[in-house]
Image: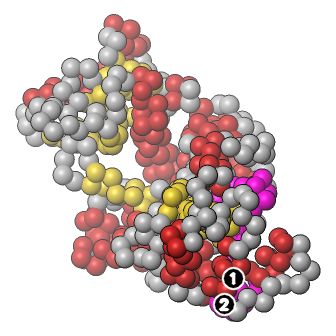
């Protein structure tokens, strides 16, 4: 495997997947797809791969088919050491040339921003499929090309391998480059204080580009500097990150009416996470919001999360910066636009804690349970989600913020690995534990296996002495504070 360059932070398994694909031993053309939202470092990884393997990297831009082909020919000429660009007649001619290059070793061909090429030349996927099939079946061994296409438009990239698409069934690699996990993000930002790390993550998430490219390397010096950091970076009209929350939506090609999509996201950021709640908040009929919700899901900006114990679902914004923009910046856009960042933050900080930080902390706790559950909960993990348990005695619902379920096997009781409640700014006490115990009893009565269920209290503010005493007596009670979450 090609050694990962020292300048690439983390991304070990992504690099392993890419380098294994690039150096694959199969004596035929191989095809792979790399996707992910913008700013996650896909281009960074692919350029490093091309440099490490001697492969050819081409980043497309918006333009006509003829212009894109000309730029491709110029880039290919530079790669081959020719002073004159190759005058390819069409894309088939260009691909045939690449596939005819020396065959003594696997050679990566990386087409970045592939959706731009598809827009200019809609037949390109079909042409690529035909050329791959030709060298994989009719002329096996005639080329060792490793073709990688990459794009940030998830709605477009998702269709390349679906349904009756020409390239469906051809990919030997499907790599989705995700944001860094919250622990990795803290290390990337160089933040050792877990409380500060959680606050920063609620604003910028795990997107690598936001550290250096969008905030010019301005890092919060301490927990006390967090407020000042927000004012001088995200709320500062002079920084690149100031308009990023708007641009992330505008960059999606399937979005025709940005105002409607912003309204949907604003509704979710306000806590209206159900289909009916979203429709009611924006003043639409439920039937009229199907398209924008589906598009936002396809774009990877909105995710539908099933209730762990009911046939119900809720929607969540996947990008923290969009949640921050919708909840804090969008309502104050006029004052922010004329430079009143400090005043806006002074009156919005409490709103940030309730509308942004509280829900985000619950998400962090679920991510902790998903990624690190095997360290604290016995048995395999099949699902991690929020859940609702109905108490028939009181006719009330018990909200479970972090439900960890075991794998679902036919004709077997579903194991409940853990039930958890999360509070960012409240010291948790025995009453929180009692609520979880009641939920556990109700689930057992419904046929769930709760014999090994761990009751978990997640808190950003700590636990009172009585709850700590309960945890010391009962090994099935877990108290997870911020240092526990951040390992």
Q: Residues within 10 Å of mark 2 (few under 14, many from 20)?
A: few
Question: Of helix, strand and loop, which mostly describes the magenta segment?
Answer: helix
Q: Quadrant of residue 408?
A: top left
Secondary structure at numbered mark 1 = helix
Residue 150 seen anywhere in this rendered image of the structure: no
The percent position of residue 60, horizontal first and vertical second, equals: 69, 77
Residue 449 seen anywhere in this rendered image of the structure: yes
Give the residues drawn in magenta, as a range.
Answer: 42-71
Instruction: Please state if 153 lies on the left or on the right of 161 as rendered.
Output: right
On residue 392, the disc is none
Q: How many marks?
A: 2
On residue 94, the disc is 1
Residue under label 2: 90
The residue located at (14%, 27%) in the rendering is 444
Q: Is residue 331 above or below residue 433?
A: below
Q: Quadrant of residue 247?
A: bottom right
């Amino acid at each position: 495997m090609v050694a990962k360059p020292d300048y690439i932070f983390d991304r070990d398994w992504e690099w392993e997947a890419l380098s294994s694909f690039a150096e694959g031993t199969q004596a035929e053309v191989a095809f792979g797809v790399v996707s992910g939202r913008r700013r996650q470092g896909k281009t960074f990884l692919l350029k490093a791969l091309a440099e490490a393997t001697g492969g050819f990297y081409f980043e497309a831009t918006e333009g006509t088919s003829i212009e894109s082909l000309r730029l491709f020919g110029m880039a290919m000429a530079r790669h081959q050491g020719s002073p004159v660009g190759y005058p390819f007649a069409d894309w088939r001619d260009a691909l045939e040339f690449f596939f005819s290059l020396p065959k003594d070793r696997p050679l990566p061909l990386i087409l970045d921003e592939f959706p731009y090429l598809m827009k200019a030349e809609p037949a390109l996927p079909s042409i690529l499929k035909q050329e791959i099939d030709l060298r994989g079946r009719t002329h096996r061994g005639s080329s060792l090309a490793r073709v990688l296409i990459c794009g940030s438009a998830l709605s477009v990239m998702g269709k390349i391998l679906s349904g009756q698409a020409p390239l469906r069934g051809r990919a030997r690699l499907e790599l989705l480059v995700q944001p860094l996990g919250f622990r990795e993000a803290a290390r990337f930002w160089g933040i050792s204080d877990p409380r500060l790390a959680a606050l920063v993550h609620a604003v910028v998430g795990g997107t690598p580009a936001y550290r250096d490219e969008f905030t010019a390397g301005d890092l919060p010096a301490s927990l006390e500097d967090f407020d000042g950091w927000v004012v001088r970076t995200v709320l500062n009209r002079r920084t690149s990150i100031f308009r990023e929350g708007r641009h992330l939506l505008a960059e999606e090609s399937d979005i025709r009416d940005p105002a409607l999509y912003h309204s949907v996201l604003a509704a979710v950021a306000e806590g209206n996470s159900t289909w009916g709640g979203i429709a009611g908040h924006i003043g639409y009929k439920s039937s009229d919001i199907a398209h924008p919700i589906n598009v936002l899901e396809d774009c990877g900006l909105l995710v539908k999360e099933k209730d762990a114990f009911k046939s119900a679902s809720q929607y969540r914004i996947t990008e923290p910066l969009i949640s921050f923009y919708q909840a804090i910046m969008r309502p104050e856009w006029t004052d922010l636009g004329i430079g009143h960042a400090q005043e806006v933050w002074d009156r919005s900080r409490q709103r940030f804690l309730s509308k942004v930080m509280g829900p985000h902390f619950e998400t962090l706790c679920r991510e902790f349970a998903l990624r690190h559950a095997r360290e604290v909960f016995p048995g395999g993990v099949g699902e991690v989600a929020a859940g609702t348990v109905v108490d028939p005695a009181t006719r009330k619902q018990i909200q479970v913020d972090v439900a960890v379920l075991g794998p679902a096997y036919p004709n077997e009781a579903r194991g409940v690995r853990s039930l958890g409640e999360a509070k960012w700014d409240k010291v948790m006490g025995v009453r929180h534990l009692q609520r979880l115990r009641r939920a556990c009893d109700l689930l057992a009565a419904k046929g769930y296996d709760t014999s090994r269920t761990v009751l978990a209290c997640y808190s950003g503010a700590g636990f009172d002495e009585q709850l700590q005493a309960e945890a010391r007596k009962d090994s099935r009670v877990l108290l997870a504070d911020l240092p526990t979450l951040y390992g």
